[in-house]
Amino acid sequence: MTTDWQFEVPTAGSKRLPPDARYMEALSSQGYGFEVAIADLVDNSIDAGAKDVVIHFLRDGDQLVSLLVVDDGRGMTDEELDVAMTVGGRRDYADGALGMFGTGLKSASLSHASSVTVVSTTKRTRATGRRWLMERAVSGFECDIVDPSYAQSLVDRYAQRPIVWQGTAVRWDGVKDFPKHGGGGQTDRYLQRTINRLGLHLGLYLHRFLARDDFNITIAVEDVRTSTVYLDFGVEPLDPFGYPVSGHPEYPRRFTASVPSTGDVSLQAHIWTPKSNVDEYKAVGSVIDRQGFYFYRHNRLVQAGGWNNFRQPEQHLSLARVAVDLPHGANDVFRLTVKKAGVDTSSEFTSSLEKAADSDGRTFLDYLTAADKVYRDARKRSGSARKPVIPPGKGFDPAVRETIADELPAIPYEEPISMRWQKLDNSFFFDIDRESRTITLNQHYRAAILGGRRGGLNDAPLLKSLMYILLHDVFEKEYSGSREKDNLQLWQAILVSAARAELDRVAEDV
């Protein structure tokens, strides 16, 4: 091995290597979640000065056909629309803009749809439109020019709201997530599930904007054939720090972390109220997911929870939440992901947290200790009043297991109770095996209970939770007495009758 080393790599000229058209495929395969993609489009509306944004699901009977995000922002001219539809298109972002890389509209849309059409109008220019069709995009970056008459008709469709004088409509077609066959209530179930998740996501990540009097997001569902509006509601802000009463009388407190290359970073540390059931507390994942840092960029939440390698999450810190407004401008300490769904922090930031303190000399580490104590004290109070139980195990949704662990003290060193589906005599809805700590549900009734949804290990969380509540204490005894046996027979009879009624309903629908 030679000892000489060149600190600079010598070069012999350069050559231009433009991306292959297949780059569009890579751009559309970045793992955008549905809600994250829609939020990215709403960010563009906010940057355009929109006050009113409508997310419009369009259906034709049982079939979902398109999705649109329409706003009353400044709109775009023909030239500006070309820049917006160019991958990485160069434009000057305002100081408080939510956009960054010039890829969000294209990558977010084509991650979920086979084509994205953008139509826009300003107060001084006629409607204009462009369309990226995935088939043409990957063959040579060919972007379609939308027929001006159609562009105007789409603007006119939303002339009453929200495009009164100016605005933009982004249309998705061939949405991959839409049910392929809408019969049997699949479309209604999809819409209910998806819109609920979307409303929570937008309400959380854009809560500072939604709290203003001059900004609204509406989610609506319309039948294009009959013009029937099935749903039309406003998204409510979900402030992750919107607790009714602080969990600790001395919090929130503001700590300062001195980061050498960035300067002082403010940490607003909160301790949530124990045992909270409000949406503002529960909107973020599990108990483990929702603790930690909540990073904001230009008032837009870009990360909800997580300790960014500062420490491991744990149950005892589930009440700890820290709001951090990121410094303006790009830097190497806080790096926002392209999808604006997280922040990568350098070791410089995590090291600064060890010495972070408030104006009274209290440290950030003291805050973590206080949050831990609030949680433990609340567990002691509730634990002393509730009887310990054998906890649930396999077959239960993780969120259900976490809630039960949070609400009920566990009997130590006991094997958890598992839940599974298996063939049983149809006169039985369930079976109990004390030795293996298993509750078996009758496979015959599974499809009716799931209502056509696909099954899995942790399916039917509501039913399984109720069965656990009903049966968990049976496993604390070696055998059942006469009264308990009678109760088990009673529950069997009622549940079998209810399950058969569900089967009859399914047969009628078919």
Image: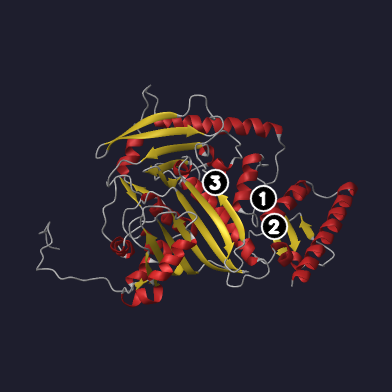
User: Would residue 415 appear left or right of 304 to someone viewing this image?
Assistant: right
Q: Which mark is drawn over residue 283? A: 3
Determine the image quadrant of residue 145: bottom left
Mark 3: which amino acid? Ala
Residue 454 in view here: no
Q: Which residue is mark 1?
A: 392
Disc 2 from disc 3: Cα separation: 27 Å
Q: Are marks 2 and 1 in contact (CB under 8 Å)?
A: yes
**Residue 5: x and y, percent?**
12, 58
Label 2 SS: strand
Image position, residue 251 (x, y; %): 48, 27
CB under 8 Å between callouts 2 and 3?
Answer: no
Look at the numbered disc 3 and give the secondary structure of its residue: loop
Which is nearer the eye, 224 or 481?
A: 224
Circle 1 SS class:
loop
> What kind of residue is marked 1?
Pro
Q: Amino acid at mark 2?
A: Met
> Around disc 2, counting alpha carbons within 10 Å, would you say few (fewer than 14), some (14 to 19), or many (20 or more)?
many
Which residue does the image show at 24% across and 40% down from the upper left? 261
Q: Circle 2 sits on which residue?
A: 419
Q: Residues within 10 Å of mark 3 (few under 14, many from 20)?
A: some
Residue beneath the point at 60% across and 52% down: 398
Q: Nearer the viewer, residue 14 or 62?
A: 62
Which quadrant, please, contains the N terminus?
A: bottom left
Q: Give the spatial CA distance, label 1 vs label 3.
A: 23 Å
